[in-house]
Image (tube, rainbow, N blue to C red):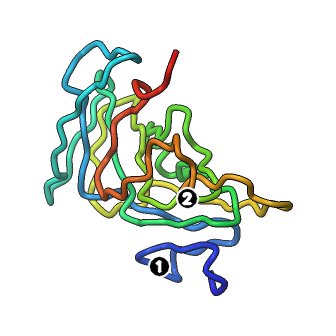
Amino acid sequence: MDLGLIKIEPFKKDCLGSNSYDVHLGRTLALYKDSVLDAKNHNLIETFEIPEEGYVLTPENFYLGVTQEYTETLAHVPFLEGKSSVGRLGIDIHATAGKGDVGFCNYWTLEISVKKPVRVYFGMPIGQIIYFEISGEIITPYNKKNSAKYNDKKPIPVESMMWRNTF
């Protein structure tokens, strides 16, 4: 962090563990508007804020959430995993996208599903980021990649941009 290769905002020293940094659930959640999603089309979302009394997630819905923390990772591969306490509540925070890219500079969108109804709160610990050092030259960091779909800095969940791919 002193070298400017990793940035976490806001940074709180007490969130730094022996091998990871705890991140927290941001204020905004989102649900897809349509009940059937289409990989070739832009699937729109509706966002809403978590009220002070919390919000109950249900198993029949798939939620997008966001971390409270903005991160920049310029020379490491970041991995986001759920905290064990979150997993023990039956909350999964990512469907497939636990690994970030070198050059990822943004808030993390969470792909949240639950096994049972569970009340969540803004600011609760939700996950942990582990950084893996890389060696060698970084040819195309994510934030310099022309085809990168998630470079717009937004403190809200971002829907799938699969529809921008050619297939």
Number of numbered callouts drawn: 2
Residue assigned mark 1: 11
Q: What secondary structure is marked by label 2? A: strand
**Residue with the most extreme bottom position:** 2
Decide: few, some or many residues near mark 1? Use Cα within 10 Å; few <14, some 14-19, many ≥20. some
Per the rendering, the mark at residue 58 is: none
Q: On the rendered structure, is 106 left or right of 120?
A: right
Q: Amino acid at mark 2?
A: Gln
Q: Locate residue 126, reporting x and y percent.
A: 44, 55
Of the pair 102 and 145, the residue shown nearer to us: 145
Dot placed on the residue nearer the N-terminal end, 2 or 1: 1
Say which element carries label 1: loop
Residue type, numbered disc 1 = Phe
Residue that badge 2 annotates: 128
87 and 49: which one is in front?
Answer: 49
Q: Quadrant of residue 73?
A: bottom right
**Residue lying at 23% horizontally and 29% vertically, measured from the top left:** 44
Residue 132 image point, x, y percent:
74, 60
Can you say which quadrant of the picture contains the N terminus?
bottom right
Residue at image position (47%, 79%) is 11
Q: Nearer the viewer, residue 86 or 69?
A: 69
What residue is shown at x 51% (from left), y 80% (from top)? Answer: 14
Q: Residue at x 35, y 30 (%)?
A: 116
